[in-house]
Image (cartoon, helix red, strand yellow):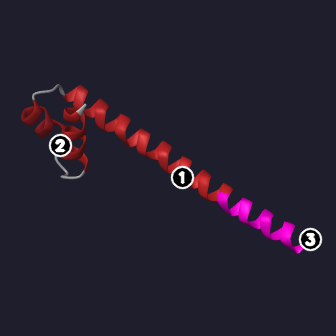
Amino acid sequence: MEERIEVVEYVTNQKHSYSEATERFQVSYQQARSWVLKANLRIRQLEGQVADMKLLEEFVKKYQELQRKG
């Protein structure tokens, strides 16, 4: 798992190519690409969940405000 994280960070954060990652980490091009794509998908899913939670929090605040006003 740590190797996957290193590969993803190497490609995404340090802006290296998949080919460079394959040489450095001795993994296939397809494997490096797959790990990066899966990580990006997971990040988007988590960002969506965070956005949903923020929306729910705002809804609850408004609802409680309306309840107090009566």
Q: Which mark is residue 70?
A: 3
Principal SS element in the magenta part? helix
Q: Residue at x 35, y 39 (%)?
A: 39
Image coords of residue 49 (percent x, y)? 55, 47
Q: Out of 61 and 47, give the one closest to the viewer.
A: 61
Residue ranking furthest to the front: 68
Residue stretch in magenta: 57-70
Q: Out of 48 and 19, give the one closest to the viewer.
A: 48
Horizontally, is 4 left or right of 68 in the view? left
**Kind of residue at badge 1:** Val
Image coords of residue 18 (percent x, y)? 19, 38
- Is 59 one of the magenta-colored residues? yes
Q: Residue at x 66, y 59 (%)?
A: 57
Q: Which mark is residue 17?
A: 2
Horizontally, is 50 left or right of 17 in the view? right
The residue beneath circle 1 is: 50
Q: Residue at x 88, y 74 (%)?
A: 69
Q: Upstream in the sequence, badge 1 or badge 3?
A: 1
Disc 1 element: helix
**Kind of residue at badge 2:** Ser
Q: Upstream in the sequence, badge 2 or badge 1?
A: 2
